[in-house]
């Protein structure tokens, strides 16, 4: 008996298939756009840049690019994946039309960026309202994490420069709203900077925070219910004073550099003053303690600032730094939150590490490189990336439940968006029949059912 050769069956391939839709699961993103009204908002925002008798709407073109990026594209030409599926995405502009629009928007500069940001802010308010108890402000507080991102340039681009990590490219500063342990997060600010921009430049942190606050509903643009969280790059007198300025009254949790003065104060802390650090589940964190510094170390900082230091046994293989003491790794942060235990505040600050997950998602969604040459064009690209990340955050928030809400872009693409379907036209209706054997077809159907229950935009 002849045995088959190879592990996989041989199939004959032909290129004449009809009524088949690839990336059919991306209908989830298209339906999210429709239910949130993002297409209408962007169309209205970019109406001043629509040329007379133009066939394609600038807002639709920009949104199509964002959808292509959300599906894994990393350049303008990847919009072809949408153009191939007019039954799902409608008419899509040609590559030359897309390129001309990006050039036009880049020439308009800050006016266009402001228009796009205003549209996103308007829709974000609606999405949070539709999300109800799933919204990031459901607990009465919003947390914004600031962090820098190194974007490597593999060719000469405007404002590309050597970075502090010995690479070459750009150093954007970004802001993300944290969705907490039950969700992911969404971008609210992206400030494009040269690669040699400083990590602790206070002016850039202030600008990024202003962009982030402008994206939030009005009631969160000032006041203690908004928490600004960042690492030691934001631990400057100027930035902390700006956050605590009278009339702004923002809450903050900002990492601080271990200076010689702080180091000497830590050495004087008695053993009885150290409190065990805790984990997210409330259990004691093994080998970690926290304490609050007081006295003249706070001179020169805004009133109400609390300086909290943590010492922890270094992990296996970690090397001690010159600022560490007694074989313990030291970290420090400042906050103006009063009336809460320091162990709880230290845990809250440590959860800032979730921003690294948001950066990883951004890198997988158009931020691995900036595809255009001019800085003005790449600023528009950053807005496109943020729209794509918005959709990848809003769709799970509105339509997914359980662990699927925690899926990052790569998993969403692999399991949901990549599902294939058959397009059936009957009467005046078009029906997508998803593959019955696909393991995550039920998740797609259920998510579409949740979206169908949402009211249409007025």
Image (cartoon, helix red, strand yellow):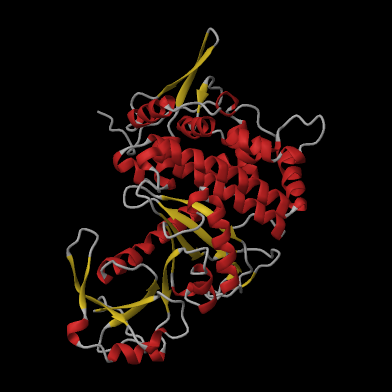
Q: Is residue 55 left or right of residue 228?
A: right
Question: Residue at position x 44%, y 86% from top?
Answer: 299
Residue 123's place in the image compared with 234, above or below, is above
Q: Is residue 369 left or right of residue 431?
A: right
The residue lying furthest to the front in this view is 247
Q: Quadrant of the C terminus?
A: top right
Residue 33's place in the image compared with 232, above or below, is above
Q: Quadrant of the N terminus?
A: top left
The residue lying furthest to the top in this view is 427
Which is nearer the eye, 152 or 303? 303
Say which quarter of the image contains residue 163. Answer: bottom right
Question: Residue at position x 52%, y 32% from top?
Answer: 30
Spot occupied by residue 341 in the image (x, y as percentages of width and height): 25, 69
- Residue 456 in view: yes
Spot occupied by residue 366 in the image (x, y as percentages of width and height): 55, 51
Question: Residue at position x 40%, y 91% from top?
Answer: 260
Question: Residue at position x 28%, y 33% from top?
Answer: 3
Which is nearer the eye, 329 or 99? 329
């Amino acid at each position: 008996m002849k045995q088959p050769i190879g592990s996989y069956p041989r199939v004959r391939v032909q290129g004449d298939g009809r009524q088949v839709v690839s990336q059919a699961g991306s209908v989830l993103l298209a339906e999210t756009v429709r239910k949130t009204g993002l297409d209408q908002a962007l169309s209205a925002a970019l109406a001043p840049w629509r040329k007379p008798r133009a066939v394609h709407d600038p807002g639709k073109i920009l949104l199509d690019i964002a959808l292509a990026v959300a599906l894994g594209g990393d350049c303008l030409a990847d919009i072809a994946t949408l153009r191939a599926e007019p039954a799902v995405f409608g008419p899509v502009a040609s590559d030359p039309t897309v390129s001309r629009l990006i050039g036009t928007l880049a020439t308009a500069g800050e006016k266009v960026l402001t228009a796009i940001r205003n549209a996103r802010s308007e829709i974000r308010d609606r999405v949070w309202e539709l999300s109800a108890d799933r919204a990031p402000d459901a607990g009465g507080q919003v947390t914004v994490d600031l962090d820098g991102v190194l974007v490597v340039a593999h060719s000469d681009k405007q404002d590309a420069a050597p970075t502090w990590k010995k690479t070459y490219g750009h150093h954007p500063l970004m802001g993300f709203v944290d969705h907490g342990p039950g969700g992911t997060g969404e971008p609210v600010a992206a400030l494009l900077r040269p690669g040699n921009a400083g990590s602790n430049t206070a002016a850039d942190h202030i600008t990024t925070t202003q962009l982030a606050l402008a994206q939030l509903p009005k009631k969160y643009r000032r006041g203690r219910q908004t928490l600004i969280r960042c690492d030691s790059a934001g631990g400057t007198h100027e930035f902390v004073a700006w956050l605590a300025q009278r009339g702004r009254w923002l809450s903050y949790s900002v990492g601080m550099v271990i200076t010689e003065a702080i180091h000497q104060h830590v050495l004087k802390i008695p053993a009885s003053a150290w409190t065990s650090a805790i984990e997210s589940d409330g259990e004691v964190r093994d080998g970690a303690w926290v304490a609050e510094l007081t006295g003249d170390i706070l001179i020169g900082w805004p009133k109400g600032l609390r300086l909290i230091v943590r010492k922890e046994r270094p992990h296996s293989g970690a090397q001690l730094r010159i600022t560490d003491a007694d074989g313990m790794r030291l970290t420090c942060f400042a906050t103006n939150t009063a009336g809460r235990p320091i162990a709880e505040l230290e845990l809250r600050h440590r959860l800032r590490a979730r921003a690294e997950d948001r950066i990883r998602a951004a890198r997988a969604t158009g931020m691995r490189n900036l595809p255009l040459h001019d800085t003005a064009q790449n600023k528009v690209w950053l807005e496109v990336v943020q729209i794509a990340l918005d959709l990848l955050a809003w769709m799970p928030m509105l339509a997914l439940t359980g662990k699927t809400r925690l899926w990052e872009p790569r998993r969403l693409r692999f399991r949901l968006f990549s599902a294939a379907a058959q397009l059936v036209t009957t009467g005046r209706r078009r029906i997508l029949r998803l593959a019955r054997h696909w393991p995550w077809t039920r998740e797609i159907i259920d998510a579409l059912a949740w979206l169908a229950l949402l009211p249409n935009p007025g």
